[in-house]
Image (tube, coloured by chain):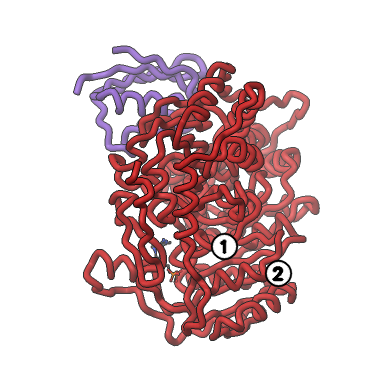
Chain colours: A purple, B red
Amino acid sequence: MQNKKVIVTIKDSVGALPRIIQIFARRGFAIEEVHAKTIGENKEVIIIFPADEYIQKIVLGQLNKLVDSIEVKDEV
Amino acid sequence: MNGARGVVEGLLDEKAEVIFGIPGGAALPIYDEFHKEPNLRHIHMMHEQGAAHAAEGYSRVLGKVGLCMGTSGPGATNLVTGIADAFMDSVPIVALTGQVPTKLLGKDAFQETDTFGITLPITKHNFRLSKSEDAYQNTRDAFNISLSGRPGPVLIDLPKDTMVGEFELNKEQFKYTQLKALPQNSNEVFSKVVDLLFNAERPMILAGGGVTIANAGLELTKLAELLRCYVATTITARGAIPTTHPLSLGQIGMHGRQVVNHSIANCDLLLAVGTRFSDRITGNLEAFAPNAKIIHIDIDATELGKNVPFHMGIVSDAKTALQSILAVAAQKKLQGKDNLFRQRVKALDVECRCNIASDDTPIRPETIIKEINEILPENAIVTTEVGHHQMFATHFLKVKNPRHFLTSAGAGTMGFGLPAAIGAKVAAPDQPVIDISGDGSLIMVCQEIATAVENDIPLTIALFNNGGYGIVQQWQKEFYEGRKIAVEFGKHTDFVKLAQSMGAEGIKVERPSEIQEAMKQAIMSDKVFLVDIATSTVDNGMPLVPPLGKNTEMLLGQHCPLVNPRYFDAE
Ligand SMILES: Cc1ncc(C[n+]2csc(CCOP(=O)(O)OP(=O)(O)O)c2C)c(N)n1
């Protein structure tokens, strides 16, 4: 599987990172790299993960579904 | 005011009227505010799991947020099963949990549990209050999040210091935190749906819990009538179309009716509304509606294509979508026609209606449902536990209205029915409430009989007492060569005495002819009343599709003869 990269902007509150990570953990999806930095009231989180089309679709959908996520950008 | 008052102000401004819960050290600041608040009725449950299920029962009846509360540590972990249950069935509840003071977090303080972490994957959203100032805002946001879009449970963890800490509340400045909006669908989208629906030779509708949640039962029924299309339902859509309606076919899937599973397998178009196509619905995916174009409508975009590929996927709540489809169809003056497929479904439906009357003792579970149907008041709300009794109720109980059949579907939580019945009765005090129960399930939550009695919440428990875990026994028989383990018990448990010991009434029933009288007596008594019915263990009560087997290859039983789907083969 090819590595995919996604950039999530999420409100920086208690548990912002675990919310993102548990999407992967629960489904047994792997993560290659995570980078996070605080920008004002938000966190910008870059995740690199091996994915086929289905995994990518699920991950993007779930990230968008998070109540606190503000933007989900998907880069190949 | 202090943080605890901030939470309660939030609850009151959200028009909350009832909360189910149990106090404890970390929860006391809030409880003290409940004490001062006559407009918020606190119902003291006997176990926090019961509190969460009662909140669910309340919510499932009214479509409003149900509220529950527990203290930190074990109080919170006891709530977890009910929260997970609400998550699986998209039930809007808000759970409040006490927590140790912020500075003790991570110190393994007395009754400290990472409630936030534990509930992260089983809530739609959760909060841990970090300062008293957020108490009001987070509480109101919790309600808004819980109800919006696809509903679900929201938890607020309340460290004790944030509850006693003082802050100034300025309600004028209050605004909900903005949530993501649902996409709008164009009329062309629904126009295309209408074309597909009316051009199909063999259309079927599959309605899921989303139809119930969106209060779209009427629209569903109208569309079925307009199309002359049969409707299969998942367990959470029971009553969305009256089960007595000629176009209502009933349950699909693992415990589905034969006619439903064969019709779906043979349809050329499937309109699926508000269902997530769980494994219990589809069985083996390759054999699920193999010849159908699937139009999948769901309010949650992540459901589309998750389990089943679609021809058209539409993100919408069920009511808006069905209304739009109806509007387009009315404009085009379309009307579905009777044809061979419909006649065949109808014939199979008739063949599939087995005789459930019998004089057998112990009494067959389907016979109990038949007798209950005879006396069930039109406005009665029925809850169930989990097991054979639940499946028989799903097959045979007449449910004429949505939100009148409450059952733990996605989680299959034994012990749901009794506390949910308590919540339902609080929500609808003028309607009779009946818990269809199994002995295995009831004994898991029997302490809530005391809750009902103490709080004067009349309800009837119809106990299908078969001396064990009927449905598990069936699986051991079918899939483990009958090696029974841990499925028989209770020879020495007298459920009538158990009920009586808590101040409820009870009678035993041994013959089918006694059921109606006993149930009438229980319902009319306006008390907490248990009817202990000597029930037979069935080999195979209803069709059973082995896990991940094909829906058309069902195991049948002595009382469930094979119907012949030859009608379809001819095509
Ligand atoms: C909390 C919980 N534990 C275990 C199970 C697994 N399970 C499913 S049905 C069942 C037995 C149910 O027995 P009973 O309530 O007596 O119903 P019956 O099948 O006999 O009608 C069990 C143990 C479950 N669904 N929920």
Q: Is residue B418 above or below residue B12?
A: below
Count up the numbered dots: 2
Taking depth in this image into account, of B450 and B109 the one nearest to the observer is B450
Left or right: residue B278 compared with residue B11: left
Q: Is residue B16 above or below residue A70?
A: below
Left or right: residue B473 compared with residue B181: left
The local secondary structure at tag 2 comes to loop
Left or right: residue B551 compared with residue B441: left
Assign the C terminus of chain B to one quadrant of the image: top left
Can residue B217 be seen by looking at this rendering?
A: yes
In the picture of the structure, the residue carrying the numbered disc 2 is B458
Task: Identify the residue shown where x is 24% and y is 73%.
Answer: B483
Q: Are marks 1 and 2 on the same chain?
A: yes
| Three-letter residue code for mark 1 | Leu
Q: Position of residue B286 (x, y in %)?
A: 28, 40
Name the N-terminal-most of marks 1 and 2.
1
* Badge 1: residue crowd in 10 Å (few <14, some 14–19, many ≥20): many
Assign the N terminus of chain B to one quadrant of the image: top right
Question: Where residue B247 is drawn, which disc sits there?
Answer: none
Q: Position of residue B414 (x, y in %)?
A: 47, 63
The local secondary structure at tag 1 comes to loop
Q: Chain letter for mark 1, please.
A: B
In the picture of the structure, the residue carrying the numbered disc 1 is B397
* Badge 2: residue crowd in 10 Å (few <14, some 14–19, many ≥20): many
Q: Position of residue B266 (x, y in %)?
A: 37, 42
Foreground mark, 1 or 2, reads 1
Q: Quadrant of residue B255?
A: bottom left
| Three-letter residue code for mark 2 | Pro
Mark 2 close to ligand 1, CB under 8 Å: no
